[in-house]
Image (cartoon, rainbow, N blue to C red):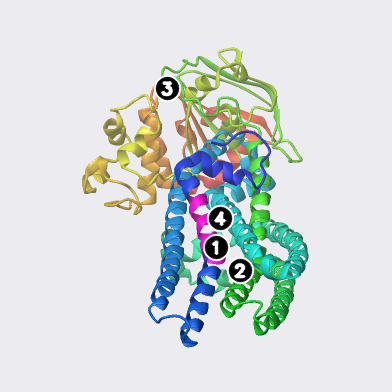
């Protein structure tokens, strides 16, 4: 559906035809037929009706002739409405087909990108613009091209009528139409650029809207009463983004409407010019009415409608430029491969003088980091916020591969392993672990797609028995309020669901990267103790800046300045009276 290439506005039509060739063809045919019938055919039928009525009033034709003329008018009106409705129906079918094919294709690209693009502000804004509503962006372009084609067809059919009566009027209208084409295209580019500039403000307002209206913030909104303050911040961000767009939109509106008024004036002059031929009996009154009606209808199309369609085509072109940049972002090798069904057993894990700096960052987060871990032991990485603890887990799990030094697994560089093997090596429970609003069973099963049938046991081991018993459908109950029959659970229970995901995994190394930071210190210590018992004989890494879990570790590694500054058991480090001892003394009352 989506190729790695440079896209242009016309590619919106290609994407639509690719998604639904039959309905897209029908959409084009019906829209074209509607244009011809709505303009030239309607003008001729109207002229026939007026002339027939005039002849009847002059007693040169019988009264019964009016019925056929009236029937033709009503029939054409019905055809216009019917073809219009049918065109909208086929357009909706195209939209549904795009929803089924385009959105998954965008998501697939998104899932394969290198992780650095997610944490980079500029590339994340690009990703947000492209992935927010690709179906609407493409269909807006398709509709604009169809509408532009309708205008061209309408104008061409009316021009034939005008040329047959007043050829010079057609040339004058055409000469004023060309500049409007250019102005409309220019307006579209400026409007889309204004939207791009406003993107950062839009993302902020979306976040603040969630704070003000989201279900998860209801308690704090009620308790702290921060609505007015957040509302003011939201208003500031909204106004900043809105002003960027309003300035451009207002200027373009004045230009387009000024051009439309000029064309309307020309249409009036054409109508006045045609009065003479009518008075001299060179043109029938019916043809005068038909042409004048068609001319004013054409002017409306050449004015606002053409301006809007060309603007939308230009906007679609700007979106397609973003899509071109989006699809050319570098993908992480093997990002979409599944983890190996049978993970490699890890006997040793070693960092050798590893140095790492985030893309666009200044100082290195890890600066010559070296350590060695043995299988079957429990380790704790501790240090202040920003010391580099989470960065270690990102490097281990393959999110970043552009580091200096070596990370050795069983003596072999991590980057030399297939991506599928690396994915199967580690099971990580992050601080900001995901909450999937699906069945609890599926929530847990995500931890290992090759270990079906172990969800109930993992839930039991994670201490979720009481929660499962209270859920309406047990472990098959959807969590959250998105799906029908879904039920909410507490934050601590969500954390145990995340722990269960790790338990169901067969990864040889389990990592807990501060997943309990929202818990009180006593609850945190208890949860780590439960996890330590379940992981007996397995390799585990606890990452924390709070020290409630450190006594459970066989060895503690203190990170500071991107290096290991202290290492040993709890007792050894306390005896050394170094940084670890200072941190523990400062926190020990939390756990007493």
Range shown magenta: 27-40
Per the image, label 4 sits on a secondary structure element best described as: helix
Mark 4 or mark 3, which is nearer to you?
4
Q: Is residue 394 above or below residue 246?
A: above
Pointer 3 or 2: first along the chain: 2
**Of 196 and 89, the residue lying toward us:** 89
Pointer 1 or 4: first along the chain: 4
Pointer 3 or 1: first along the chain: 1
State which quadrant residue 154 falls in: bottom right
Q: Is residue 344 above or below residue 218?
A: above
- Which residue lies under the disc numbered 4? 143
* Mark 2 residue crowding within 10 angstroms, few (<14) / some (14–19) / many (20+): some
Pointer 2 or 4: first along the chain: 4
Question: Mark 1 and mark 4: span between their CA atoms?
Answer: 33 Å
* Mark 4 residue crowding within 10 angstroms, few (<14) / some (14–19) / many (20+): some
Q: Describe residue 466's horizontal placement relative to residue 20 as left or right.
A: left
Q: Position of residue 275 (x, y in %)?
A: 68, 83
- Which residue lies under the disc numbered 1? 208
Residue at the farthest top position: 411
Q: Is residue 179 magenta?
A: no
Q: Position of residue 298 (x, y in %)?
A: 63, 68
- Which residue lies under the disc numbered 3? 538
- Which residue lies under the disc numbered 2? 233
Q: Residue at x 33, y 37 (%)?
A: 442
Question: Residue 236's mark?
Answer: none
Question: Mark 4 and mark 3: span between their CA atoms?
Answer: 59 Å
* Mark 3 residue crowding within 10 angstroms, few (<14) / some (14–19) / many (20+): some
**Of 246 and 19, the residue lying toward us:** 19
Q: Is residue 39 magenta?
A: yes
Q: Position of residue 435 (x, y in %)?
A: 42, 45
Per the image, label 2 sits on a secondary structure element best described as: helix
């Amino acid at each position: 559906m989506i190729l790695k290439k440079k896209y242009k506005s016309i590619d919106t039509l290609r994407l639509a035809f690719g998604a639904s060739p039959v309905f897209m063809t029908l959409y084009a045919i019906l829209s074209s037929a509607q244009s011809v019938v709505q303009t030239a055919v309607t003008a001729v039928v109207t002229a026939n009706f007026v002339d027939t009525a005039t002849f009847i009033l002059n007693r040169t034709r019988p009264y019964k002739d009016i019925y056929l003329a009236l029937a033709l008018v009503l029939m054409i009106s019905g055809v216009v409405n019917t073809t219009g409705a049918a065109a909208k129906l086929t357009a909706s079918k195209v939209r549904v087909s795009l929803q089924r094919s385009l959105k998954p294709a965008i998501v697939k690209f998104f899932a394969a990108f290198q992780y650095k693009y997610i944490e980079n502000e500029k590339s994340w804004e690009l990703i947000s613009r492209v992935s927010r509503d690709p179906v609407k962006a493409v269909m807006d372009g398709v509709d604009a091209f169809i509408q532009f084609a309708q205008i061209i067809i309408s104008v061409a059919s009316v021009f034939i009528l005008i040329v047959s009566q007043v050829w010079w009027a057609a040339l004058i209208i055409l000469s004023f139409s060309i500049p409007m084409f250019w102005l409309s295209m220019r307006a579209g580019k400026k409007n889309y650029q204004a939207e791009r500039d406003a993107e950062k403000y839009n993302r902020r307002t979306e976040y603040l809207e969630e704070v003000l209206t989201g279900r998860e913030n209801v308690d704090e909104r009620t308790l702290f009463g921060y609505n007015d303050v957040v509302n003011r911040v939201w208003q500031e961000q909204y106004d900043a983004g809105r002003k960027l767009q309003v300035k451009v939109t207002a200027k373009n509106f004045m230009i387009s409407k000024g051009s439309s008024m000029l064309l309307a004036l020309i249409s009036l002059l054409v109508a006045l010019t045609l009065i003479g031929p009518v008075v001299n009996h060179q043109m029938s009154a019916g043809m005068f009415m038909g042409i004048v009606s068609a001319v004013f209808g054409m002017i409306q199309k050449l004015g606002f409608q053409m301006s809007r369609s060309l603007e939308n085509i230009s906007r679609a072109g700007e979106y397609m430029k973003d899509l071109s940049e989006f699809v050319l972002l570098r993908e992480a090798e093997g990002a979409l491969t599944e983890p190996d069904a049978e993970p490699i057993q890890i006997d040793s894990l070693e960092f050798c003088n590893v140095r790492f700096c985030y893309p666009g960052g200044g100082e290195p987060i890890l600066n010559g980091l070296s350590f060695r871990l043995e299988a079957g032991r429990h380790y704790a990485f501790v240090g202040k916020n920003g010391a580099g603890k989470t960065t270690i887990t990102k490097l281990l799990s393959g999110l970043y591969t552009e580091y200096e030094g070596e990370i050795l697994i069983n003596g072999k560089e991590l980057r030399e392993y297939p991506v599928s093997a690396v994915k199967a090596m580690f099971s990580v429970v992050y601080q900001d672990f995901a909450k999937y609003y699906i069945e609890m069973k599926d929530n847990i099963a995500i931890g290992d797609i090759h270990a079906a049938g172990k969800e109930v046991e993992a839930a039991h081991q994670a201490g979720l028995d009481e929660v499962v018993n209270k859920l309406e459908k047990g472990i098959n109950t959807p969590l959250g309020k998105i799906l029908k029959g879904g039920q909410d659970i507490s934050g601590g229970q969500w954390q145990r669901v995340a722990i269960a995901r790790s338990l169901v995994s067969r990864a040889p190394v389990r990592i807990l990267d501060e997943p309990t930071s929202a818990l009180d210190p006593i609850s945190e210590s208890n949860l780590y103790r439960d996890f330590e018992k379940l992981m007996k004989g397995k390799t585990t890494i606890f990452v924390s800046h709070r020290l409630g879990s450190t006594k459970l570790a066989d060895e503690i590694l203190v990170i500071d300045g991107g290096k290991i500054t202290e290492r040993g058991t709890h007792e050894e480090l306390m005896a050394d009276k170094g940084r670890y001892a200072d941190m523990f003394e400062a926190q020990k009352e939390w756990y007493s």
